[in-house]
Structure formats: structure tokens, C-alpha cells
Amino acid sequence: MGMQSRNNLGRLVVGLLLGILCAGVAAAGAQTAVVPLLGPSGLAFDGSGGVYVAEAGRHVVDRFDPATGKFVVVAGNGTEGFSGDGGVATSAELDGPQGVALDGAGNLYIADVRNQRVRRVDAGKGLISTVAGSGVAGFSGDQGAATAARLSQPVAVALDGAGNLFVADAGNHRVRRVVLATGVISTVAGNGTEGDAGDGGAATAASLDAPGGLAVDGLGNLWIADTHNHRVRKVVLATGVIEAGADGVGLPKGMSVDAAGNVYVADAAGHRVLRVMGGVATVVAGTGAEGFAGDGGAAGAALLDGPGATGVSPAGLVTLADTRNERVRQVDGAGVIRTLAGVGPVGALSLSGPAVVQYGVGTPVVASAAGATGSVTFYDVTGGTPVALGTVDGGGAAGLSTLLGVGNHTVTAVYGGDGNFLGSMSASLSEVVNPVSGVTADFALNPTSATQAVVGGASAAFGFGVAVTNGSLSGPIVLAATGLPTGATASFNPALIPPGGAVTSFTLTILTVKKAAVAPVRAAAVLLGMWVVWLPFGWRRRGRGRIMGLMVGLGLLAGCGDRVTSLATSSTGTVNYPITVTGTSTTASGAVLVHTAVVTLTVQ
């Protein structure tokens, strides 16, 4: 197969996949939250209920409005890097953004992790700027300008009501504070030494280990997800003393606080969201098992996968970034969980099977997409047309059994996606199907309705059975119909009979055309033309009597126009058409098989 042919075929399959995906989005209607997210790692709500989502894998921050379904990018152009300060935020480059926070004026703060910066998007003009971090990884700058200080992996941010921005400086094992009015940075927790020590003493003398989440409650307490110490800790900002909040948390990350002072933390390793209150952590969502399940049911029975952040909506609903499930999910007031945004990871589709098989034996090709449901269309790439349609179930397998004919094949498969997974296309698989020796297959076409009578302009349907004998055919049965009435069209369903014996019947539909309505008009038009040509002469030479006679004859001919036709008719005005249906296929040895069946179409 030439390069041009391969390119065209690739476009065909990719085009089909895109068509399936677009159809799925169109069917969703206003649910524009059904868009792919890539590594959602930070959440924040504005006062109107809009949720901001940091997509670390796509290097953007989005805003989704659950009330209207509007989903827009508010920062980042999708290119990994650093650029754009002083310009429009959507034209800027980010690098792995994670934590996000909003102040009372609607300004957005972004932990631009791999750029070693915290950046702000102005609520009024949408312009982006750096508020902390020089862009060079390290530790320096306390008591000086925050934009000249060095940070190391700033993964989370939080704000209090007094104009302070807190930054989880994970690589420096510290939490730092920027006074936004002055731009001065300082350390509020952590001595820079990786470890777990200092509870009950000054927070700046305590040891932390890669803090990964922050939240500030209404009482002026700073909550810290001390990630690699598997703890939640609290700093009383009024005194600067650090205390234990909750122990035994798998891998605490993004945090949030509700109006009642409940602290929520995403446990990425435990695949849960926990509520911390009074030193006790209780489960809000997740069983602790890794996976995706449970939408529409109790949040405590749902499966999560590496949640990285939490948030609380203005209505008090706990929301989580289910990071490796590529979703934002929310728990309602009744404790029921649902997906708020995202469609899950790509349903990675793979093909497997032996390189050589005997025709009709075993399952040569199997497609799998673990955990996914929905349709899989198999393609024989040499022909570019689907040769089978299977279903990927929860077990993740759909088989293409005896539907490949004898010969060399290159097979690929397209997965259309479902409510949980995006569609995908598999890599190709080479398959050689050998003939079965000593067997000569054959087939017959058997009409189940030999005669149909219709009025011109109506359609007639003929049913046929397909009987395959002496084994299996190596190729499809290609169907054709001849002897149709003039202007009629024929179609078969299915268009051809695939090999393998799965399809044992088909329908021929013939759409006829009206004859009676056409002939009188034509006859009248011809005679009228003759009369117009003859009129000047007839008026002078023949007199009015002959003109009137001609007009009467014209009327009679027009009234009987249904008999003016080029088709042979019976005494009852009907026409019988013998329709020959031909089926063509091949045997395993390559011999061509041709069989016919005749039905009768009567057009009245």
C-alpha cells in the first residue's frame, strides 16, 4: 500500500474518532463541563459559585460556572514555559500550575510551580503579573521584596482576610507569607530542615516535610498539609505557635475550610477526602480504594484516584479535584457525589492477538480498555472499512473473531468513549489468516417474500435469508440488484454480508417513482405546442370548428394521460418487474462464488 493510501486511511479513522467525540459533546447539550481536564490539581470558588481549576498537565487555569455550563480558560495559553507578565493572562505561559486562591476583589493567585513563582491575574483587566518568586529555584529573600525572593516548588497558596498571601514552599519545607500591601516576604512556618518536629513551639522553629496544602480559617488559624509527614498541622497566627491537627493521613495535599470551621483535606495516597475537626479526621468521600466509580451514590462509597485538592462552594458543598480521574467532583448536601467537570482519562485502547491464525478458529484479535464501556469499531486498515463492531465491557475486552477473511491484514480499532472516558484509537496489529484445507464453502440466497405490489412512488421491501454451507466463506457476500423499474433505486441492509456467519439475513428495499402524474402532463404539453404552432394557419383556413375539435381531442388525451407511457402494461394497468439479486463472494482457495435469487415487483 502506497504512502498516499496510508495517509488517506489514517485521516479516515481519525476523522471517524473525532466525529464520534463531537457527536458525544453535541448530545450533551448545555453540559459544557463535559470537557477533558488534564491533571486538575487546584480549586477555588468565587462569590457567584464559579469554580477555578488549575490544570497542571495542560498549563492553564479554567473557570467553570455550574449555573450556566460556561467553561473558559482564564490564565495560560496551554504552552509549558514562562512568559506574559504585564499582558493578558490567557496569552501567558505557565508551567504545571497547582494551587489557586481568590481574594475578595476577585483577583486570582496561581502557584506556578515549575516557574518557581506565584502569579496574580487582575480581576479588572485580566492582566497577569508575578507577586512572589524570582523564577530561580532556591531559598532567599526573607524580609525583602517577594518578587526578588527564591522559592522552591511553590505548590499551594491561601489568603486571609487581612491581605496576607501564604505560600507552601514545598522544596524549602517552609510556609511563607507575602504582605500584599508592601510586597514583603517572610517565613511563618518551618525552619528549612526536612523533618517532623516542633509541635507546641514557634512555627518558624518547627520542621516540616514538603508541605502541599494550605487553608486559613475564620479564627485566624493557618492549616498546613504537612504532606510527607502524613499529618495536618495548625499555626495560630496570633501567637505563631504550631500544633498538631490530625495524624495518620496518607498523603495530605490541597485544603479548604467551610464557614463552620471544618477543614477538608485531599488524601492523595489514601484516595479519600477527609474532614478534620477537633483533632479527628473523618471520611467525606472515597472508600480508600483507587479507581473511578460511584457517581450518583453515596460519596463515602465512591472510588477516587489521587485527589489533589479540595474546595467549598458558596453553598457549602465539598468539591474535590479527583486528579488522576481527570475530574472535578462535588458532594451535595445529601452526601451524594457527582462529576462537576471533566470526562475522565483517555480510554487507552490496545489490541492483542496471535500473528498467525487458521480461518474460523479462535479469537484472533481482542481490543481492551480496562474500566471503560461503549462501542469499539474494528478496521481492516488495508481496506479502510469496519469489519466488525464489538462492545468493551467493564472487564475491558471486545473480540473480533472469525470476521477476518483469508490473507494478510492490518487491524486497528476506534473506541468511541463513554460517560467516563474519552475516545481513543489503538495502534495497528498485523494478522495473517490461513485457509482451512479440504473444505469448500458455498452459500445460497433464499427470498422470504418473493412478490411485492406497490403503487408508483412507494417503496417495496423484500426479505432474504443467507445459508452458508460447508464451512465459512473467506470474504464478504457483496450484493447487487438488477431489473429495476426506470428511475427506481435499490438499497440493502446490511450493505454486504460479512464472513463468519454472524449475519444470516438481509433486506432489499426498492423505491419506485410515479408514472401516472408525469405522462398526462407530457402528452398535454406536446399537443398544446402543436396547437400553438398550427393556430395562425388554422384560424384563417379551417375555421373555428376544427380548432374546437382539436381542443376537445387535447382534453381527452390529457384526461387519459395515465395510459400514455413507454412501459408495457397489463390489462389492469400494472407492470411486473422480475428483480434479480446477485451475491458474490470468495472461497478460502480464492475461487469466486456467484449466486442469484429472483423476486417480482408489481407496480400499479
Image: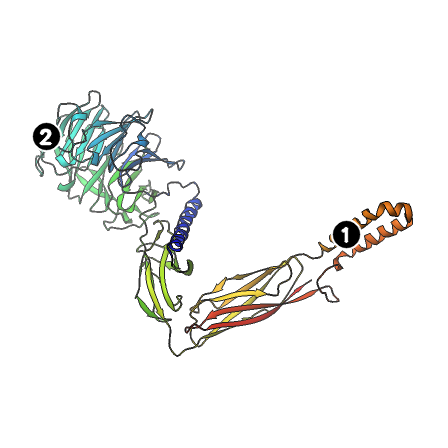
Occupied quadrant, residue 510: bottom right
Residue 162: which numbered mark, if any? Answer: none
Residue at x-position 57% and y-position 65%: 481
Examine the rendered structure and indicate whether residue 346 appears above or below residue 478. Answer: above
**Around disc 1, counting alpha carbons within 10 Å, would you say few (fewer than 14), some (14 to 19), or many (20 or more)?**
few
Q: Nearer the viewer, residue 334 or 52?
A: 52
Instruction: Decide which of 406, 21 is in the foreground and name it.
Output: 406
Q: Is residue 552 left or right of residue 576?
A: right
Color scheme of the displayed model = rainbow
Image coordinates of residue 466 in percent, x first then y, are 50, 70
**Quadrant in which the C terminus is drawn:** bottom right
Q: Quadrant of residue 204?
A: top left
Q: Which residue is mark 2?
A: 204
Q: Amino acid at mark 2?
A: Thr
Residue located farthest toward the top when viewing the structure as drawn: 182
Residue denoted by label 1: 526
Q: Are marks 1 and 2 in contact (CB under 8 Å)?
A: no
Residue type indicated by callout 1: Val
- Where does residue 156 sit, x and y in percent of width and height? 21, 34
Mark yes or no: residue 382 visible: yes
Coordinates of residue 289 in the picture (x, y in percent): 24, 51
Residue 439 at x, y = what percent?
41, 78
